[in-house]
Image (cartoon, helix red, strand yellow):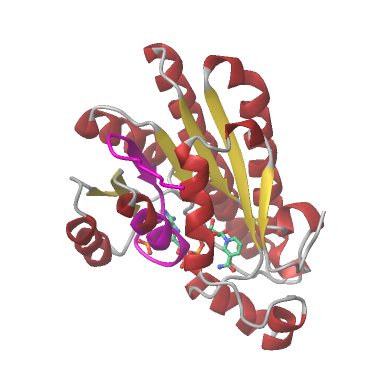
Amino acid sequence: MYINLSGLNILVTGASKGIGKAIATKLAEAGATIAIHYNKNVREAENLASVLGNESRAFQADLSKPDEAANLFDRVALEMGSIEILVNNAGMATASDISSKEGDWLDIWNNTLQVNLSSCAILCKKTVEFMLKRNSTGRIINIVDNAGFKGDSAEYMAYAASKAGLISITKTIAQSYGKKGIKAFNISPGIVRTEMGNGIIETKGNDKATKDIALERMTEPKDIAPMVTFLASGMADHATGSTIDLNAASYLH
Ligand SMILES: NC(=O)c1ccc[n+]([C@@H]2O[C@H](COP(=O)([O-])OP(=O)(O)OC[C@H]3O[C@@H](n4cnc5c(N)ncnc54)[C@H](OP(=O)(O)O)[C@@H]3O)[C@@H](O)[C@H]2O)c1
């Protein structure tokens, strides 16, 4: 099976490191042009753009700020001419003790919901509007987390809630716009070896990460990227609305 994504423009959020970087790399290897979104890691993102080639470019936006998600989409669409696929990957997971000061807890709650849910929703909305207006077809791939189904430990309540919201956005888009040619998928990892994953392991302990999985090694970003590439290819369009678990059998539906 050969996957050729040349001619497709793909916006990958949070592509400066971790899972997003692996996804952007795999998609570009299949020929796509990547809009490499980043927030703080400008050097990583610019460097990745030159390594990936295919006229890939880096775009900055702080997705904790409501205006910046919409603005990001508009800039990418203008500079690249079109967007055929959106990969909502950028995310944050900050632990917050429920006994911490009310304001601190609420700040983390609001920030998490803005980055992981509201900005993703804005990018989904802009993508759907863009495709409907042009009568074009396309795909949205949202990177969620099995915490969105099963919940999480109390300090990651906001994180789990944000991912549960994103899961249902995907399902709604799939059901509402399939006949217009717009497909939407969730990819749901367990703990993945990245900066975020390492932070979660530090909070929960290494045992939690390794005991729950059925395979001998932890999931890495390179284990996530091929599935995104496959979904982007259109070969799995009849899976629209579904969630693909990539969690080494640590959580099964
Ligand atoms: N790692 C895991 O165990 C795991 C498990 C399940 C699901 N996931 C999901 O997979 C996705 C990627 O996670 P990861 O592990 O690769 O995380 P990561 O290594 O921490 O990378 C996070 C990415 O998101 C971007 N980002 C963070 N806050 C942002 C903000 N305020 N505005 C814009 N961009 C922001 C970062 O950009 P800069 O670095 O440029 O600032 C970076 O590119 C997330 O949605 C996460 O929830 C991860």
Q: Is residue 246 visible?
A: yes
Quarter of the view holding residue 205: bottom right
Where residue 49 sits: x, y (%)?
22, 56
> In the shown orientation, is residue 52 left or right of residue 219?
left
247 relative to 166, above or below: below
Identify the residue shown where x is 38% and y is 31%. 84
146 relative to 99, above or below: above
Q: Is residue 98 visible?
A: no
Q: Which residues are magenta?
A: 1-25
Where residue 105 sits: x, y (%)?
66, 62
> Count the marks: how many?
0
> In the shown orientation, is residue 105 left or right of residue 1?
right
The reply to whether the magenta stretch includes residue 17 is yes
Identify the residue shown where x is 62% and y is 45%. 186
The reply to whether the magenta stretch includes residue 214 is no
> Which residue of the protein is positioned furthest toward the front in this rendering?
1
> In the shown orientation, is residue 108 left or right of residue 39?
right
Residue 35 or residue 159, whichever sits in front: 35
Quarter of the view holding residue 167: top right
Where residue 72 sits: x, y (%)?
33, 39
Identify the residue shown where x is 29% and y is 39%. 6
Where residue 53 sits: x, y (%)?
19, 53
12 relative to 250, above or below: above
Identify the residue shown where x is 26% and y is 66%. 44
